[in-house]
Amino acid sequence: MIALSVILPVYNDAQALAAFLPVLCEWLGQRPGRQEIVVVNDGSRDAVDAACRAQQARLPAHVALRFIAFSRNFGKEAALSAGLAAAQGDWVAMMDADGQHPVPVLAQMLQLGESGADMVAAIQAERPHEGGLMRLLKRGFYRFMQDNARYEIRPSAGDFRLMRRKVVNALLALPERQRFMKGLYAWVGFNTVYLPFAAPPRAQGRSKFNYASLMELALVGITSFSQKPLRWISRTGLLVSLASMLYGLFIVADTLLFGRDVPGWATVVAGIMFSAGVQLICLGVMGEYVGRIYEEVKQRPIYVIDYEWQSGGPDNAPGRAPDAPPPEPLP
């Protein structure tokens, strides 16, 4: 039985991975019991495979290294899902390979887990690399998402987490294809402890997330975990209808009582344009939800595995045994 599995999703971070793997392997080598590292290559175009193979000869005796390569880039949420499906440890940790998730913090997370926590989520207390606009948008996003009193999507609690096996099994049982992992962590519940930490600067490379990718992820999160936009559509339609009815009654009363001509075209055109704009916005919001439904009903797998290999550990020779099947994509 494997005591701890560490999942590392990687996308074009070969240099950072080559620097981080020896540090992680050295720490795992000092822990008792079998340990496992699961590297998920999310369609990288650099030498991620070579960086992992170079580490094989330096693996501690009781540490296994498993490498899973996607057929293309499917996104970090898919890479995390593949890592969770492949991990076999009693405890499963997820870390970034860029060095910003320190190994000593993982050691603290394990201590909290041994004290009774089912899931330990690291919270990055400060993000000096983020601009003011990014911080403002993130703050507004998480405030918008808190519309459910039964669970909380905690701001700044990312994918740097440690989970018991029962938490992993609960996450794997969730069938959706459009996965917003931060929301899924909160939805499954369990006893969660939050651990603040200070992330060091990236030693290699730069972040692959930009405004466009973060906006897409935010839309997935909103359409997966919030019904606020749909409620706002209903309220907006009610307010516009009420305002139109009141204005129509005013025009009728003004004409019948005072016999005034209703000056017309500017008001009519402005009203039509306003109503058309509101309708298009409402259709766009509903279209986002319909689009998510469309993606779900197609039942495509979350990811496609190109190849994989495994080495290290007391029961594994270099390379995968012929009878060892690859991890199945989530249903």
Image (cartoon, grey):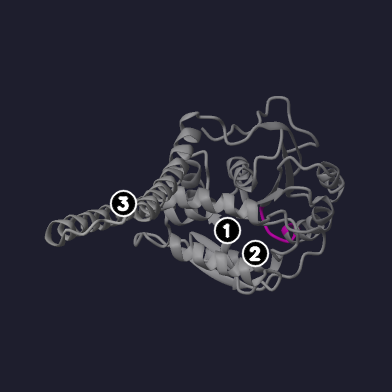
Q: Position of residue 30 (x, y in %)?
A: 74, 61
Q: Is residue 315 magenta?
A: no
The percent position of residue 43, horizontal first and vertical second, equals: 74, 40
Q: Amino acid at mark 1?
A: Leu
| 127 to 14, vertically: above or below | below
Residue hosting label 3: 237
Q: Earlier in the sequence, mark 2 or mark 3?
A: 2
Q: Amino acid at mark 3?
A: Gly
Q: Quadrant of residue 304?
A: top right
Camera-side residue of 249 and 234: 249
| Mark toward the start of the polypeptide (1 vs 3) | 1
Residue at 34% from the left image edge and 62% from the top image edge: 149
Decide which of 311, 151 is in the foreground and name it.
Answer: 151
Q: Say if mark 2 contacts mark 1, CB within 8 Å.
A: yes
Q: Quadrant of residue 75?
A: top right
* Residues shaded magenta: 28-33
Residue that label 2 marks:
106
Q: Left or right of 127: which side holds 186?
A: left
> Mark 2 against mark 3, which lies toward the viewer?
3
Q: Mark 2 packing: few (<14 Cα in 10 Å), some, or many (20+)?
A: many
Which quarter of the figure is the N terminus placed in?
A: top right
Q: Is residue 90 left or right of residue 56?
A: left
**In the rendering, at what x and y percent does residue 312 appear?**
77, 43
Residue in the picture at 52% in, 42% down: 178
